[in-house]
Image: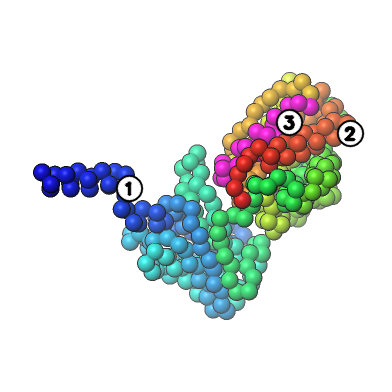
Amino acid sequence: MLKRIMILCLVIMSIMGVGCVNAATPQITAINWSVNRENNLRVVLDCTQLTNAKAELTDTSLTIIVNGKLRPTIGRRYSFAGSTVKSMNVSAQGDKTILILPLKRPLKSSEYKLFLLRNNPGAKRPDRVVLDIVNGDRTVGEQKSGGIANCIIPTYSVAGGIRGKHITLDPGHGGSDPGAHGSVTGVEEKSITLPVAKKLKDILESKGVIVAMTRTTDVDVWGSDATDVQELQARVDVAEKNKADLFISVHCNANTNKNIGGFSTYYNPKTPYDEKIAEFIQNRLLKTANLRDLGTRSANLYVNKHSSMPSTLVELLFLSNAREEKLLRSNWFQNKMAQAIADGIEDFYKQNGGVS
């Protein structure tokens, strides 16, 4: 009888997870790598849960130390082509995984970036540790200082109200990319998003926000010869460099059906807060006029997906709709939309109740 009781207790404990000392230890389940068209190397470690990592740089090697137990089936040596990294050796040291990348040349602090990506259930992607290295000519954003770069849970804050928050605003398009065109006057999207973002900047700063903008004039952010990815990543880089708590991209919509109109906001559910900020802004925009509610929508838009902080892309009505084009061009309605976005952001910080 005693033996049966002991067996039953062990079964119950195993179901409840009691006594599973290693249950909370992150595990590295896969290591993948790729090289983009600019010959930049990306190494991705799939993890069972969000973890942390750090990088240690010398003149001859880059070492990545990840808090996660390496599964035995994962490969231990990788070879690369390029001007910076020739190989990668992977080893397990208890509950840590060590990646050593010998260098063909000294690596500058601005030429690599170590960061985390939260799990994306919609895309069936786990929590990940990501390393980007310039293995060709172009540099990535500054990430390191004093020989050690730490990669922990992104440092954005959603607590404590709007005052003192760092917010990056991204006026969509610009320079060589005009965006959509108005169906009546031919007005370009880039000439709407910039003044709205500037008005929004003024309102936010009056509330004590520290605002950065991806552009303040009619220019390309990366440069006129950029690929789409380069231009979009350059906008994300501004937010990352300024350690933004929030990233807001401002756009106008268009459709071949000139009767379609309304407000919509897009987000990628990479943090617990992306959908929330989109909803707060959408609710405020709907109060500006009797216009259609196209809702908040989950999407894999580049700037939302690749920014580490909560973000949303706001579609300010349709330039293809004659009535809405007129509203978008008017100074008074641009003021209303800027105020609505600012109010939505403030609502988010007042009502979210998140943790820093």
Identify the secondary structure beneath mark 3: helix
Do the residues under discs 2 and 1 have CB atoms within 8 angstroms? no
Among all residues in the image, which is located at the extreme bottom? 59
**Mark in front: 2 vs 1:** 1
**Mark in front: 3 vs 2:** 3
According to the image, label 1 marks what residue?
Answer: 17
Q: Which stretch did the figure color magenta?
A: 269-288
Identify the secondary structure beneath mark 2: helix
According to the image, label 2 marks what residue?
Answer: 331
Q: Is residue 215 visible?
A: yes
Residue 277 inside the magenta-drawn segment: yes
Q: Earlier in the sequence, mark 1 or mark 3?
A: 1
153 lies left or right of 323? left
Mark 3 belongs to which amino acid?
Answer: Arg
Q: Which residue is at 35% across, 57% downward?
A: 22
Residue 315 coordinates in the image, percent (x, y): 72, 34
According to the image, label 3 marks what residue?
Answer: 284
Residue 150 inside the magenta-drawn segment: no
Among all residues in the image, which is located at the extreme front? 2
Q: Rate crowding at label 2 as few (under 14), some (14 to 19) or many (20 or more) other CA atoms within 10 Å.
A: few
